[in-house]
Amino acid sequence: MEAITELAIEPVHTDFLPINGMDYVELFVGNALQSAHYFQNAFGFQPLAMAGLETGLTDRESYVVIQDKIRLVFTSPLHGGTSIGEHIDRHGDGVQVIALWVDDATSAYQQTTRRGASSFLKPVTEQDEHGQVVRSGIHTYGDTVHIFVERRDYSGVFLPGFIEWKPAHIPTTTGLRYIDHMVGNVGWNEMNKWVKFYEDVMGFTTMVSFDDKDISTEYTALMSKVMSNGNGRIKFPINEPAEGKKKSQVEEYLHFYGGPGVQHIAVNTDHIIETVRTLRERGVEFLQVPASYYDDLSERVGQIDEEIRALRELGILVDRDEEGYLLQIFTKPIMPRPTLFFEIIQRKGARSFGKGNFKALFEAIEREQMLRGTL
């Protein structure tokens, strides 16, 4: 009995970096105001806050939009010779900050830098009449950074230094709820390096992995591992190129982005048919798979609630795992360079990432690459 008791009281693993969720995603862009308007009019985001000359900033301006739990920040430089402008010159418009909501930004910084992370922002307390926010940050792949945000003592609209932004024109929302996952593209033979970074530095675990046999077509291939934090609220798939006959989508991304970075942001909806139909009406363009994809859909995925006719009309993909099924669709690149795009996803029990759709999806991407002359 004593031996059994000893085995039963093994120490429980503790999450040294508890994360409550995604706080915001900041994109460096050539024109913050125009980008914010695009995401309002096309994707249904609502205006939230702004900062710039009106609030005392002299080097940049930022506009913040929100839809349910998703906050996007668009930031542009106000003059030449800034680090923001250099980032845009290297990468074009794209994600620079993935901000994570934590209870203790100082502890998050200490825990990650102690484990080998390179410091981006030492813990700093920012205050205004609405309270205070503590932020800190570390570097990750490429020029991407993670900012840890502690906001329990703050009641303002976004962050200290921001004021409410209330334009006259406010389009309706489109049913987007939260960020499901964010995908990073890294260079040749770098996937395992960054998998180890998320394991060792941030305490993430590998949720699922795909090799070039899972993700390949006649011409191109890539490999991917999905990293997840302790409570499963943060999921970061990491992609790297694999050998193929022609240039893969990851290679195209690395070429035009000028190195590793965020490839796509997957956003959740509870009603994907209505959401996608609205997005299409507002001008959002999606990748299209051949109509034949739907011919044997019922045999491949089993019984689903949605009408296949509607899925075929909109180009929505379906995949099933042991726990349920998911529906997903991918936009074309939304920036001037063929880099960042969005995924719209609805989960009906499934926790996977659409492995059964990889071939059809990648062939659709290759058709776009052929049109661009980059395959």
Image (tube, helix red, strand yellow):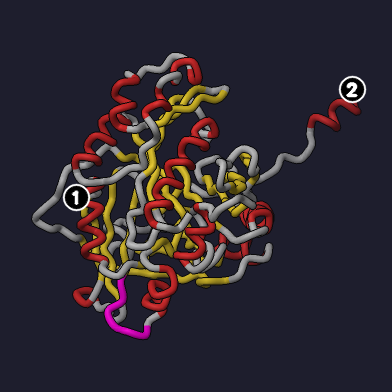
- Can you identify the residue that label 1 sits on? 41
Horizontal and vertical percent for residue 310? 29, 24
Query: Image point 31% across, 59% down: which residue?
Result: 158
Q: Which mark is residue 1?
A: 2
Would you place residue 368 above or below residue 320 in this image? below
* C-alpha gap between disc 1 and disc 2: 67 Å
Q: Is residue 251 magenta?
A: no
Residue 49 percent across, percent down from the top left: 24, 60
In this rendered view, identify the residue nearer to me: 206 or 309: 309
Q: Is residue 229 left or right of residue 272?
A: right
Residue 193 horizontal side relative to residue 288, left or right: right
Q: Secondary structure at mark 2?
A: loop
Range of the magenta residues?
Answer: 76-81
**Which one is in front, 197 or 237?**
237
Amino acid on which the number 2 mark rests in the picture: Met
Give the numbered dot on residue 226: none
Residue 172 location, quadrant: top left
Q: Is residue 62 above or below residue 205?
A: below
Q: What quarter of the picture does the N terminus occupy?
A: top right
Local crowd size for mark 1, using a 10 Å CA cut-off: few (<14), some (14–19), many (≥20): many
Tag 1: amino acid: Asn
Residue 51: horizontal and vertical position, in percent? 26, 69
Q: Dot 2: within a 10 Å radius of its alpha carbon, few (fewer than 14), some, or many (20 or more) residues?
A: few
Count the numbered circles shown: 2
> For residue 77: magenta?
yes
Residue 317 in the figure: left or right of residue 184:
left
Residue in view at x 56 percent, y 48 percent:
220
